[in-house]
Image: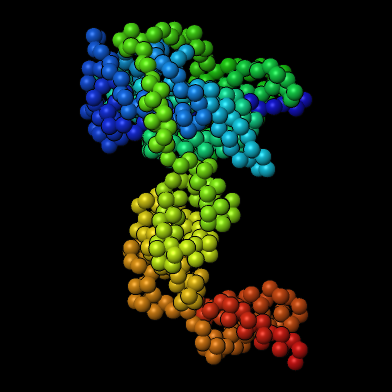
Amino acid sequence: MKYETIIGLEVHVQLLTRSKMFCSCRADYQAASPNSLVCPVCLGMPGVLPVVNKRAVEYTIMTGLALNCRISPYTRFDRKNYPYPDLMKGYQISQYDTPIAKGGYLEVEASGYTKKIGITRVHLEEDVAKLQHVPSPRPSATPLPAGEGLGVRSYSLVDVNRSGVPLMEVVSEPDMRSSEEARLYLTSVHSILQYLGVSTCNMQDGSFRCDANVSIRPVDSTVFMSKVEVKNMNSFRAVYNALEYEVDRQTRVVEDGGRVVQETRGWVEERGVTVSQRSKEYAHDYRYFPEPDLPTLMLDPAWVEEIRGRLPEQPAQRRVRFVDQYGLPPYDANLLTGSRATADYFESCLGLVEAKYASSLLGSRAKGLSNWILVEMGRLLNLKGMEITSARVTPAHMVELVELIDSGTLSTTLAKTVLEESFDTGKAPGDIVKERGYVQISDSSVVDSAVEEAIKSNPQALADYLKGKDTAARFLVGQAMKITRGKANPALVNRLVKEKLEAMKTS
């Protein structure tokens, strides 16, 4: 029997506010020492009263609008009761049946088709405390030395700094039918939130987290089967791999005559498997009821429209504009606009080109700049684990580098060397060229000499070419470039090598 994959995602996003959701404690807890950003409200002390963070509500409305949701005329907070140790007061202030936004959608571009994925709701809640688990210093089977009493084999520490940080949840419909569609949806949501500026969206520090609900069912069936929630995924790749594993696991369970149990499972990155954590709760298990300490919020339609009017250009809109305005291939436009910082960097480069040459060179320079930003700059950023906003290669440097290539001053090989040095030192490409003497050699006599030397030094390559192996010519071009230390004009080297080899073939 063939099975269909059913996936829905719950994305949790820490909002970029100065204070926490219901108190005035600072929300930027990542660099703070444990339990230093706390007060009676986020400690859950008896008798304390929460106060709603207006900026967090505004950011949630912005997100709802960007995801084509309807904004509710009124919204309410509820108490979600559960007894986990990361929630000292025994309940979380969240939203249940009256979220801020609902009924939206997001379109993603998959391979050869566009997929419309429904957005069930966008709601607001408070984050919980953070647990740090300390493993036992010795194997559990090892007897304790005399005098240590019962001993503590393992324990957990609670850091309350994160408790109360505004947490927005974006819940999708179960519309995704593959791990790839889920990855595309997740990266699209991530990109939109970056453009809105409502969160850092850093998966490594937990400001952008994802839980996946996944199940399978026979193809053509409309009945949903037991779903499994997968947690502990801290990268896009982890989400993809966890879903691939879980779909395979559930399929094997069903094909072996078993039944998939509704439960919560955790992704173990090191082993590439999901493991059972606990049984999966239903909504009624949380005993939701209206938060008695917070009134119903009335969302003024005029305020909502004012927020709509200042939404920034979205990734999909910018992608279309890059193709139309700059003549970029859709592939380049998609990669550039995936990150707001990268798209901004690219447009800063083009702004400098336009200021210097008017708009006459925008089209021709756009593709070259795109290539260098996405490929070579991207490679250097990945090696250093940096964002483009931290790069020492400024847009002015990048424009200057492409100008040196277009003018024939630098070959592609030399330009890569210059970019690496500019990346490390922050020096302008023009200054590096002057200091290092990185000037492309276009003198035919000099290049001709290097080509002659390459052919004489590699008789086997010459023999191979004469026997019909055209790849030997590329080898000889590389040898000539090596002799000139990458400074020779590549087009000139290619032409001279071909001319000389063809002359030898016919002689």
Considering only vertical position in the picture, is 466 above or below 60?
Answer: below
| Rendered residue at 30%/23% (across/down) | 53
The count of marks equals 0
Front residue of 491/146: it is 491
Residue 36 locus on image (x, y percent): 22, 28
Residue 149 locus on image (x, y percent): 28, 16
Q: Is residue 313 visible?
A: yes
User: Is residue 497 left or right of 466 when viewed as pictured?
Assistant: left
Considering only vertical position in the picture, is 451 above or below 347?
Answer: below
Residue 125 locus on image (x, y percent): 38, 21
| Rendered residue at 75%/92% (across/down) | 507
Question: Quarter holding the N terminus?
Answer: top right
Front residue of 82/275: it is 82
Considering only vertical position in the picture, is 286 above or below 459?
Answer: above
Residue 219 locus on image (x, y percent): 74, 25
| Rendered residue at 57%/27% (across/down) | 118
Q: Is residue 420 visible?
A: no
User: Is residue 379 left or right of 36 when viewed as pictured?
Assistant: right
| Rendered residue at 46%/23% (across/down) | 71
The quarter holding residue 175 reads top right
The quarter holding residue 12 reads top left
The quarter holding residue 496 reads bottom right
Colour mapping used in the image = rainbow
User: Is residue 85 left or right of 452 when viewed as pictured?
Assistant: left
